[in-house]
Image (cartoon, rainbow, N blue to C red):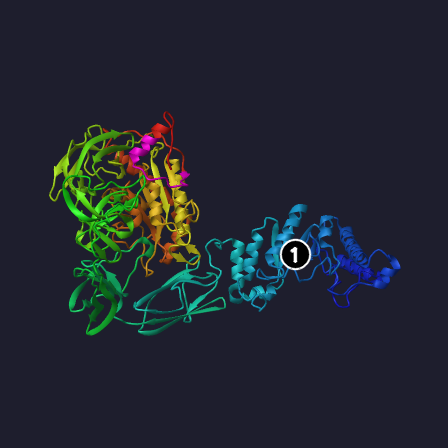
Amino acid sequence: DLMVNSEGGPDPSTPDGADAIRDMASRAVEHCPFDGWLIENPGYAFGTAGSFAEYMKTMPGGGFERFLKDSVTSVVIDVIKIIKKQSVNLYVGLLADGVWAHSTSDERGSQTSSVYESLTDGFADTRGWLIDGLFDFVMVKNPYSTEDKTAPFGKVVEWWAKLCNEISIPMYVAHDSAKVGSGEAGWKSPDQLAKQVLACKNRQEWSGSAFTSFTALKNDTSGSTSAVVRAFKGTLNEKYISDKLIINTPAKTTITTYESKINIRGSADPNFDLLMNGKKVELSEHGFFSLDFNLQIGLNTFTFKHKGETVTYKITYRVVILQSIQPASSLSLDGGTVLIISAVARKGSTVYATIGSKKIEMKQVARQSDEEEGRQESDYADYAGEYKLPAGIINKAQNLGKITVYGSYKGLSETKTGGQITIKALPLPSPDDDKPMITGDDSPIDPGKGDKVLKTGEIITVTKNYAETFDGNTADDWSRPNNAYLPKGTTDVVVGQVFGVSTYYLLGCGRRVYQKDVATFIKNGKITANKMSGASVSVNTKATTITLNSIWHVPYNLKLLPQKYRNENTQAYDISSFTADYVDIIFSYTTEVKDAPNVSSSPLFKSAEWIKGSNNTYTLRLHLRNKGVFYGYSVGWDKEKLVFSFKNPTVIQSENKPLTGKRIVIDPGHGGTSPGAVAGKVEEKELALRFSLLLRDKLAAKGATVIMTRTGDTLPDKLLNPPSLYARTNFARNNYTDLFISIHMNSATNSGARGYTIHYFNEYSYVLAKQIDVYAKRAYESSGGMSNRSETVCWDPFAVTRLHDCPAVLLECGFMSNTKEREMLISDTYQQNLTTELANAFAAYFKSISQIAEKTAVSPATTAAPTEATTVATVLPAGLIALVRRRKRAGKTARVA
């Protein structure tokens, strides 16, 4: 210690001071036979300049600051010579102050401010000494925390590391461990030293660390030293580990709930204790926790303490019979509308509603939820009843009064009043208002072109590429696999409106559509008898395309038969095997047909026939060559032609690359502003993308053409944030996609749920789901998973699985709400195991197709390498896309993404 900065210490600018320093160095070397020396405090303290009188004697006019710098440097050089004189092999290092100079003082300085500068305050040019090679190594005194505003620890280390890298000299760091637990910025938290060590380890120039206080390390205040040891050992996971208490669920600290149970989950720093109401909470390796509580009626208080931070949750549990009712606001509706009255009531309640003198019984119904909501467990259930409104009266509105819902449960009763219901007055007739309202190249065809009038009324046309249809004899919002989507341009007549979860049109064909998916074509039009004729068939490597001539764009339904479901009345369309022998396409308003299509050259169908039905319908029955062998279809209108493109079975080209020629779409769930399930720093959207990218690479290695719905945070065109469910399915529509999979992580309202699940919607996706199940189970169990799922292959009406162009499934890799399973989900072991087995499952799936249809299957042409789709082109039937390819690039290979 040269003690230049000490009060009363030697002044190197005077002869006596310089001699004292040299004498001190000589005596130290003589009496202490060390292997090396570390020199500190060579510069002046702030505001204690040297001798001006000595300056005037020796070098007046040269500048006082220069004189001081030269004096300090001269003494430092002499001390080094004295040490080296004893032995040239002795190591001499510099214990340098953290800041040489601020960049505002010298452009070569660090991005710091407002603290002591060696160069300008102490006149010690520590940087210059190192560049000149005076020292063998440097140890940086860095007393600043990572949160310091003027000289952040990381900025100081970064500056010295860059300098040491340029001159190839070892760098060590001295940490001010005596400050642990103090009130100084950043030092209150016991993880400050661990953060500093991690920051040093990220610099390749760092050779080691020293600490200013052994006593502070020995005390291990709040586990601070234990955290430092883990940081040195590299056992801290810097990607997922929490550095503070994060509680994800519930989102608010003060809430009122009607549920008797609650789950509180989040993450904390696993190096430090987390206390809840004074009791230690068990944390996983990365600090995750998930706690279930049975609530007491009234106020429940949960206080969490961690690393000096306190978070208190105040949760009030109220017991009610009726949580909510719909419609809650007033409605003005057309006469004859079917009104759905719904309520969320305690399970086991008796519920009914009244409108005026009318009583409407309400029954408990299944709750349809999409994957976004996760698994919900509740004390409450949905109840619903329907009431058909009286007919409207011309020029007179009818006020029916307000809806009142009554609920009773175990001797208790409640009522809730909803909106007022008014029946609109019927307008005066307007016979001249019958002209089409939509014009353009894609205009639908007037269904009144035929001879025989079958129905009259408001004619609508489908404006969405594919419009979902619903049963007409109910008012529910249940998606069903035996209700076909209608392509854009299809027309029908409105016979009523239905108000429930959404607003629907009831169509003359007997099914409902969302009102938002259609538009009025002719306000007062005619539906006339249709004729189907001119059937033609073309077959290419990927599809059997059947084209039918139609007078106008009639609605139809498509079913795979025969097929038994678990319980259609409760929207349970689970199947135990795919048993269809034929495909039925039922055309409405069709009274005449001509020439069944000749499908003898198709590897998918063996024959076709027309079957006359009741209520002006004809069915085109396409007999499958092999039972249960069907892979999806695309469909679209082309003027007076309806084009169906059915996927053909194909054989495997190469055992080494069994997925050659297969187009597979991978959809990483969520994205953008939709994070999905969140636990600590782990977001579902990030994990879904990680699994998906690993799967992409493994499928590509097997020869597949892989399309990703996103490779970043949202869809490639960045037009949708979050990416919509329907935009995702467009990547697999009408483009010969062979398989679609959406990757998700599950979540539940309790911490006990565990296991993976595979979800399907269409019957032909069940075969794929079962194949995946065999391989996913192997990956899950070999990675340490312990499932408590009674069924791993599940039917669900998730939007992304309702794709009919190819087999489509949604995979839930495991539960984010379960602490141990969350650890498994973020592990490289499970990510690698599951994606490897998924790739094997897909190969096995296509191999089974090849074996079943080997005698008639068509070998596909080689397709392009994996890519990311960047646009969604105009939707065309698959067969038409193939035709466009041949016309535009005859004799060349082309790919449509």
Query: Which SS class for mark 1?
Result: strand
Residue at which label 1 appears: 140
Q: Residues within 10 Å of mark 1 (few under 14, many from 20)?
A: many
Q: Name the residue at 36% across, 30% down.
A: 862
Magenta span covers which residues? 867-884
Occupied quadrant, residue 48:
bottom right
Q: Is residue 871 magenta?
A: yes
Residue 181 in percent (x, y) is at 56, 67
747 lies above or below 462: below
Residue 745 in percent (x, y) is at 35, 52
Is residue 678 visible in the rendered image? The answer is yes
Residue 864 in percent (x, y) is at 39, 33
Q: Is residue 682 magenta?
A: no
Between 380 and 389, the residue placed more toward the observer is: 389
219 lies above or below 484: below
Occupied quadrant, residue 823:
bottom left
Is residue 779 visible in the rendered image? The answer is no
